[in-house]
Image: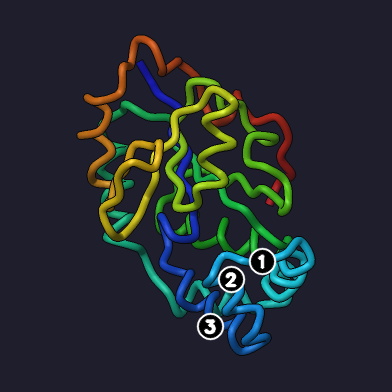
Amino acid sequence: MLHDLYLDFDGVIWDTLPLLNKIIYEADAKLYYRMVNKTLTPEDEVKKRQIYKLANWELILRNSGPLNNSIDWINELHKTGMFNMASLTHCNSTNEALNKTKLIANEAPYLKVIPVMKPASKTTVVDARGAILVDDFGGNLREWKAEGGISIKFSLKEESNNGFYNITSLREIRDIMSIIKMNEELHNGSPVKTIKQNNNY
């Protein structure tokens, strides 16, 4: 049985978040502190997206790298033949989507990149039912779970009691599969077949 497995990009596959935080701080320190304190307003979210939209994504990706040996573990997951994998990544611009797609094509050419333009939910682009999402953002995971998907929280520090399965490395995905009741929660499928809408990047 093949299982649909969607991997977030920023903060799961690639360690872009420190640079993105720096960009926000340099653009607007007050916005940065509201972001850190999780007190962003809807207007703040729009401003943050605009800052990311204007960012040099080629430079961001060049100056960051794989998180916790993510590419190595993605290669290992690919070799198992257990998963239909894709990177399901929020993007703020076509430039961001193009650069992420180009990077993954070089690092893991079998991994499809599915850009989701903000502020759209990831559940509007693919069918979450029975599929696995590994993400570092609880909001995405809650939406995924509400649509019948399986949510796995990625964090550099161990977490618990957050309502999700939890991992600190993609290496742990195979281990956590034994915890998930496969016959009740997982279904056959393919990232290609379950795409609802996607432009070619």
- Which residue is pictured at 72% across the width and 64% down the height? 41
Q: Please, what is the three-letter code of the amino acid marked with disc 1? A: Leu
Q: Please, what is the three-letter code of the amino acid marked with disc 3? A: Lys
**First in sequence: mark 2 vs mark 3:** 3
Q: Determine the secondary structure under disc 1.
A: loop
Rendering coords of residue 30 (x, y %): 65, 84
Along the viewing direction, whichever of 142 and 193 lies nearer the viewer: 142
Q: CA distance from mark 2 to mark 1?
A: 6 Å
29 up-or-down from 57: above or below: below
Query: Which circle marks residue 22 in the picture?
Result: 3
Q: Please, what is the three-letter code of the amino acid marked with disc 2? A: Met
Provide the residue designation for mark 1: 40
Provide the residue designation for mark 2: 35
Q: CA distance from mark 2 to mark 3?
A: 12 Å
Mark 1 surroundings: few (<14), some (14-19) or many (≥20) residues within 10 A: some
Tell me: 35 left or right of 75. right
